[in-house]
Image (cartoon, grey):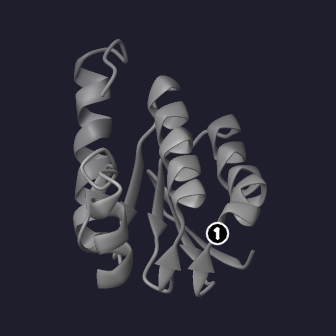
Amino acid sequence: MKVKIDTKQKFHVIYITEPALSGNMTAELSESLLPFLQIDVKNVIVNLKDIENMDEAAAETLLKIQQTFYEQQASFVICELQPAVKEELDSLELLEVFNYAPTESEAWDIVQMEEIERELLGGDNDF
């Protein structure tokens, strides 16, 4: 799986530069994203602008990864879904469960707001 990583002060933006995310990529997806929980800057934004289709297994894996991040007091936001992917996630009733932002800039805002919430609440709150 091809990825590009852009590191910011409070988060990493991961660009998955593949045309599709499928079930046979789920292990690689986990191996690419979960190690971020082991470093100081744990928050991740996954930019999916290049993904033209995603199957249910890949979507469910992303959802499990998202849950793992929040259990570890770290943010996980997906952004820039293509219309076909957004429709697929919506038909699977998964879109509403994802922490999703239409643009990368809005995803940055979500991460920063969650970071402020964690600081104010002393890290005792699950999102």
Q: Residue at x 54, y 67 (%)?
A: 55
> Hey, which quadrant is residue 89 in on the image?
bottom left
Q: How many residues crowd mark 1 within 10 Å: few (<14), some (14–19), many (20+)? A: some
Question: Quarter of the image holding residue 14?
Answer: bottom right
Q: Is residue 23 left or right of residue 70?
A: right
Q: Which residue is mark 1?
A: 22
* Tag 1 secondary structure: loop
In this view, the residue in front, 22 or 100, is 22
Q: Could you tell me residue 16's position as x and y percent?
A: 59, 75
Q: Is residue 58 above or below residue 76?
A: below
Amino acid found under the numbered disc labelled 1: Ser
Q: Residue at x 55, y 32 (%)?
A: 68
Q: Is residue 106 visible?
A: yes
Residue at the front extreme, as displayed: 91
Q: Is residue 108 visible?
A: no
Q: Position of residue 114 (x, y in %)?
A: 28, 38
Question: In which quadrant will I find the N terminus?
Answer: bottom right
Relative to 94, say whether 123 is above or below: above
